[in-house]
Image (cartoon, rainbow, N blue to C red):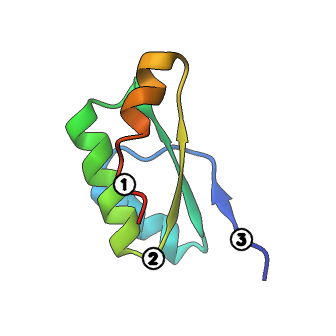
Amino acid sequence: AAPVLCRFFVTEPRQVWERRERGAACLLLMVPQLEWPRLQALHEEAHHAGLETLVEVHDEDELRLALTLDLD
């Protein structure tokens, strides 16, 4: 089966699990839309749920932050 990207970005941990139940394989996390601690927490929650993340950035500062996420 082809991976499914949920293009609606998530803002709450429960949404990670809801998206997984609906068949998502990957979530969109937007650096400019979330405070950094929340983005980190959502990234971790996605990892625990077995989902990949696509992290959207709009400038070099956001890219530097995104590159510090644990990608293991």
Judging depth in this view, the residue of 9 and 61 nearest the camera is 61
- Distance of label 3 from label 1 (alpha carbons): 18 Å
**Which residue is identified by label 1?**
43
**Looking at the picture, how far across and down is residue 12, in whole percent?**
30, 50
**Which residue is identified by label 2?**
50
Query: Mark 2 near mark 1, Cβ–Cβ under 8 Å?
Result: no
Query: Which residue is pictured at 41% across the width and 66% down the height?
Result: 72
The furthest residue to the bottom = 1
Image check: 12 left or right of 18?
left
Q: Earlier in the sequence, mark 3 or mark 1?
A: 3
Q: Taking 48 as reference, is 61 above or below it? A: above
Image check: 66 left or right of 56?
left
* Tag 1: amino acid: His
**Which residue is identified by label 3?**
3
The furthest residue to the left = 37
- Distance of label 3 from label 2 (alpha carbons): 12 Å
* Tag 2: amino acid: Gly
Image check: 15 left or right of 13?
right
Query: Which residue is pictured at 60% across the width and 69% down the height?
Result: 25
* Tag 3: amino acid: Pro
- Distance of label 2 from label 1 (alpha carbons): 11 Å
Q: Secondary structure at mark 2?
A: loop
Q: Say few, some or many: other residues with alpha carbon within 10 Å of mark 1 (under 14 / 14 to 19 / 20 or more).
A: many
**Looking at the picture, how far across and down is residue 26, in whole percent?**
58, 62
**Looking at the picture, how far across and down is residue 59, in whole percent?**
52, 16
